[in-house]
Image: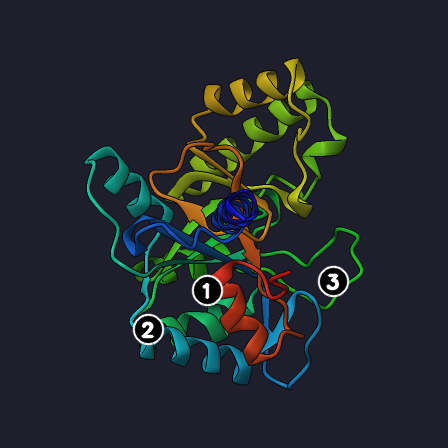
Amino acid sequence: MIYLIIILFSILFIFLIVLNIQFKLFYFPSKKIRILEYHSISINGFEDQITISKEKIIEQFEYLKNNNYTTLWMSEIDELTNKKQDLPAKTVVLTFDDGFLDNYTELYPLLQQYNFKAVCFMVLGRIGQDVDWNGKYVNENMKLMNKQQLLEIGSHIELGYHTFKHDNYANLTLDEIEKDLQLCQEIIKKEELNVFPALAYTFGGYYRKKGVNQKLFFDLLKKYGIKYGLRIGNRVNIFPLKNIYEIQRIDIRGTDSMKDFKKKVIFGRKKIF
């Protein structure tokens, strides 16, 4: 009988360890960072993988507000890390990729209304232009914010890197990636933009396989002053951030239900098992 009890307790212990690894259930609230990934906002009710309706994102913002979540920029996460200070108990980083025009027309007023902050990861070589990269969920009618708009939103939106022309780093050589980073920094300097050196990998693509090439890739990011690299992964991060070039974001899709959204905010994903 005692052996059965030991086996059952061992199974339970292992199960709890797995749960903690997957969902960070047993960490203090001040140790958790939820980084939510969005793209575009529609005003006509249209929704797909990267486009969320304005009505739905308002509902999500209401949930975050009513449940006392605090929104921070990546630069503020960095500052708290450097000062060895704690996070607010419920910390969320709202991130929006690409820099779509609706981030100015729709997102920015909502952030002002809710007193929220967000980070827009910009395709820096396409500022003020039409979308010109391939993708199932983008089209030539989608436009990107221009310089003047980027300057206007600074009270509530922090800018970050999202490559020069929306290339997938997983498909580029190290030399090509270095050239891309150089071009990004030339644009930032030329346009006199305030861009925090955090990079969201387009398509979530980077040198994922551990080894020499990954180390060279991370060394290259460090060489160009990139402090953080953000991937997709649908996990809650633990503060202070350890794997600074493999920070995980939680993919918020326009097709998610409110129930899905709540699960993602709490657990990092909507499917628990």
Instruction: State the CA–CA distance, disc 3 to disc 1.
Output: 29 Å
> Which mark, residue 138?
3
- Crowdedness of circle 1 by 10 Å Cα count: few (<14), some, many (20+)? some
Q: Which residue is mark 1?
A: 266
At which x and y percent is residue 98? 59, 54
- Residue type for callout 2: Gln
At which x and y percent is residue 67? 33, 75
The label nearer to you, 1 versus 2, is: 1
- Quadrant of the snapshot with the C terminus: bottom right
Instruction: State the CA–CA distance, disc 1 to disc 2.
Output: 25 Å
The label nearer to you, 3 versus 1, is: 1
Which circle's residue, 3 or 2, is located before the other in the chain? 2
Asked if the residues shown at circle 3 and circle 1 are in contact, with their CB atoms under 8 angstroms apart, the answer is no
- Give the image quarter of residue 75: top left
Asked if the residues shown at circle 3 and circle 2 are in contact, with their CB atoms under 8 angstroms apart, the answer is no
Question: The residue tagged with tag 3: helix, strand or loop?
Answer: loop
- Give the image quarter of residue 113: bottom left
At which x and y percent is residue 107? 46, 71
- Residue type for callout 1: Ile
Asked if the residues shown at circle 1 and circle 2 are in contact, with their CB atoms under 8 angstroms apart, the answer is no
Q: Residue at x 68, y 77 (%)?
A: 47
Q: Is 171 left, or right, of 33 in this rendering?
A: right
- Residue type for callout 3: Val
Can residue 24 be seen in the rendering of this structure? Answer: yes
* Residue 46 position (above or below residue 143): below
Q: Residue at x 70, y 40 (%)?
A: 167
Which circle's residue, 3 or 1, is located before the other in the chain? 3
Q: Which residue is mark 2?
A: 112
Can residue 98 be seen in the rendering of this structure? Answer: no
